[in-house]
């Protein structure tokens, strides 16, 4: 009945790479932010699995911290999208290139 | 065992659905399925409190934020305009990077001493909520959060405060509309500029 820890870590890794592919390939910043959320959640799954394997709830507290950071990141990212859209009427990340260093 | 594989299939399928949809609204639906499945996986790992806040915070708060921004940006303006497709240019390096990353992952999983997850005796079948002795329950998590792990809790508060200030500065009314009388919107914009100046 029990599932190996490696299964959870492999699942987390696959989900993380789906998120990485989304950030690399997609051009819509909203979908890129969602792919970043996928990566956050993949990391959370690995943390919860490790916490369960060693019966240590420090991992749970760290997942709590990661969820907070993800919420802050989503809020600020969406605020940037709204601000850019107000200025440029355009949300394609390749078109919004006026901040090239 | 069967539950894990069913949830894993749904999790990966919804993640792929999320990043392949053309419209962000469909992506949000895929992400919703993904988060709820992940909450179910947390329950299989005895993390009851995290499963609940996964649903409340992600499905309830963050996805609603996405939906509101999509509705705001789409209203009356039509679909997003998009530039040329950059996928052909980056396909090969992206494929190489992905294969290399998968290789590292497989190597790590095959060589790491990952033991099977042991059953622990304190798991209760009657619902563990509030019982501090049960791993992953609200009581267990709360005791850890407010005693041993107090610093992450304080950092959480600081991060949220920074996020609130940042969002107001970035997306506040940048072009205040004309109002009668004392122009409160202009006054707010001036105050915000003075805050930015101080922060610089």
Image (cartoon, grey):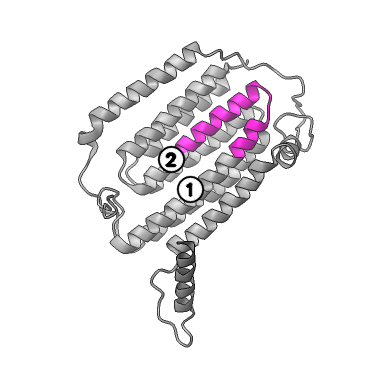
Chain letter behind tag 1: A
Q: How crowded is mark 1: few (under 14 residues within 10 Å), some or many (20 or more)?
A: some
Q: Which of A21 and B66 is in front in this view?
A: A21
* Label 1 – label 2 distance at C-alpha: 9 Å
Q: Please report contact status of discs 1 and 2: CB closer than 8 Å, yes or no.
A: yes
Could you say which quadrant of the image residue B19 lies in? top left
Q: Mark 2 points at which residue?
A: A36
Q: Which of B117 and B165 is in front in this view?
A: B165
Residue A73: image tag: 1
- Residue B83 at x, y percent in the picture: 22, 49
Q: Is residue A53 above or below residue B183?
A: above
Q: In this view, does B38 lie above or below B168?
A: above
Confirm whether the magenta stretch covers residue A39. Answer: yes
SS type, badge 1: helix
Q: Residue, x 70% and y 40% (percent of image)?
A: B145
Q: Residue, x 47% and y 12% (percent of image)?
A: B110
Q: Give the range drawn in magenta.
A: A38-64
SS type, badge 2: helix
Q: Residue, x 48% and y 29% (percent of image)?
A: B10
Q: How crowded is mark 2: few (under 14 residues within 10 Å), some or many (20 or more)?
A: many
Q: Residue, x 29% and y 30% (percent of image)?
A: B94
Give the residue at the far bottom of this rendering.
B181
Q: Nearer the viewer, residue A16 or B191?
A: B191
Q: Is residue B195 above or below residue A13?
A: below
The first of marks 1 and 2 along the sequence is: 2
Q: Quadrant of the N terminus of chain A?
A: top right
């Amino acid at each position: 009945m029990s599932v190996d820890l490696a299964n959870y870590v492999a699942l987390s890794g696959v989900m993380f790479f789906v998120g990485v592919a989304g950030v690399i390939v997609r051009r819509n910043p909203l979908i890129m932010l969602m792919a970043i959320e996928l990566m956050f959640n993949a990391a959370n799954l690995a943390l919860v699995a490790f916490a369960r394997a060693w019966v240590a709830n420090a991992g749970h507290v760290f997942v709590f911290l990661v969820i907070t950071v993800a919420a802050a990141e989503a809020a600020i990212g969406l605020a940037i999208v709204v601000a850019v859209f107000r200025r440029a009427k355009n949300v394609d990340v390749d078109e919004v290139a006026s901040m090239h260093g | 065992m069967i539950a894990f594989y069913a949830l894993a299939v749904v999790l990966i399928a919804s993640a792929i659905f999320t990043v392949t949809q053309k419209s962000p609204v469909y992506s949000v639906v895929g992400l919703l399925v993904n988060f709820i499945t992940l909450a179910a996986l947390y329950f299989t790992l005895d993390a009851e409190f995290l499963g609940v806040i996964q649903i409340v915070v992600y499905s309830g708060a963050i996805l609603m934020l996405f939906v509101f921004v999509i509705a705001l940006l789409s209203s009356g303006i039509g679909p997003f305009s998009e530039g040329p497709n950059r996928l052909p240019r980056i396909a090969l390096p992206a494929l190489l990077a992905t294969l290399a990353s998968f290789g590292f992952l497989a190597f790590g999983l095959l060589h790491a001493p990952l033991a099977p997850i042991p059953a622990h005796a304190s798991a209760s079948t009657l619902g563990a909520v509030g019982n501090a002795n049960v791993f992953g329950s609200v009581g267990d998590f709360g005791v850890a959060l407010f005693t041993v792990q107090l610093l992450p809790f304080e950092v959480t508060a600081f991060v949220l405060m920074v996020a609130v200030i940042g969002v107001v500065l970035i997306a506040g009314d940048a072009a205040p509309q004309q109002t009668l009388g004392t122009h409160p919107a202009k006054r707010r914009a001036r105050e915000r500029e003075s805050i930015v100046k101080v922060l610089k």
